[in-house]
Amino acid sequence: MSDGMHDIYFWTTPNGYKVLLFTEEAGIPYTIKPVNIGKGEQFSPDFLKISPNNRIPALVDHAPKSGKGPISVFESGAILLYLAEKFGRFIPSDLPGRVEVLQWLFWQMGGLGPMAGQNHHFAVYAPEKLPYAIERYVKETNRLYGVMNKRLADRPFLAGEYSIADMACYPWVVPYERQGQKLTDFPNLKRWFEAIAARPATIRAYEKGKALNTVPSVSDEQSRKILFGQTASVVR
Ligand SMILES: N[C@@H](CCC(=O)N[C@@H](CS)C(=O)NCC(=O)O)C(=O)O
């Protein structure tokens, strides 16, 4: 759907897909604003005003509940929480239920995402293959998969019902092979992964991404230079 109410600054990466999982699942109107991070579009002054960390995703809500707007939000966890609260979906309204979701949402933001990201970096992108670094992040990813697998032993989703915590984690499990992991080692996680992959909203979200771009963000020397080795100069 596209009516200019919610602009989603997006690229086809795990952090980008988190937001499309929500918008597709909730059926809310949104417009994708592509930000090709392999080409350096994340450094444009207009984008930095919305996302000072020069990262996708970001959201601009032209119709906030307050009636005053627009509101812009960066960081995928903040965006998921903002949308969940605005629409009253995918997070319970009672405090114990909310805390269940929030702890797994923050676990993804501080653990699974950054660690799997370092795993990709050292195992796939680094020009030098450093065994110590690769082993550290492959093992840490393995531990984090184990944490999810144990949590999912007695509930269908991380916080019980399907929630923004699952939307945050799922796109980071999609590249499990590249992270040196086997889902067959984690039967509960595998069941969770397959259940989310089969949701019509998930299928639509990934189809929309593929329609926009199928080239990996790190695809050539130019994109490597843009994405790796950034210093404070990129946000000046
Ligand atoms: N903690 C951020 C991470 C966002 C992030 O790392 N985005 C990457 C794509 S997955 C990006 O925009 N990279 C652009 C760059 O490195 O310049 C979030 O959860 O939103």
Image (cartoon, helix red, strand yellow):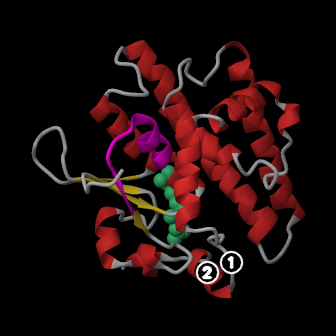
Q: Nearer the viewer, mark 2 or mark 1?
A: 1
Identity of the amino acid at label 1?
Ser
Residue 210 placement: quadrant: bottom right
Crowdedness of circle 2 by 10 Å Cα count: few (<14), some, many (20+)?
A: some
Image marks 2 and 1: residues in contact by CB distance under 8 Å: yes
Residue 193 placement: quadrant: top right
**150 displayed left or right of 236:** right
Position of residue 82 measured from the top left corner of the image (x, y, whole percent) = 33, 39
Q: Kindly state the secondary structure of the residue where label 1 is placed.
A: loop
As displayed, is residue 109 above or below residue 46? above
Position of residue 86 measured from the top left corner of the image (x, y, whole percent) = 28, 34
Identity of the amino acid at label 2?
Ser
**Which quadrant does the C terminus fall into?**
bottom left
Position of residue 219 measured from the top left corner of the image (x, y, whole percent) = 68, 77
Q: Mark number for residue 9? A: none
Crowdedness of circle 1 by 10 Å Cα count: few (<14), some, many (20+)?
A: few
Magenta range is 19-32
- Whether the magenta-drawn stretch holds residue 97 is answered as no
Q: Is mark 2 within 8 Å of ligand 1?
A: no
Q: Kindly state the secondary structure of the residue where label 2 is placed.
A: helix
Q: Spatial distance from mark 2 to mark 1, Cα to Cα?
A: 6 Å
- The residue at the point 75 percent across, 56 percent down is 119
Mark 1 = which residue? 219
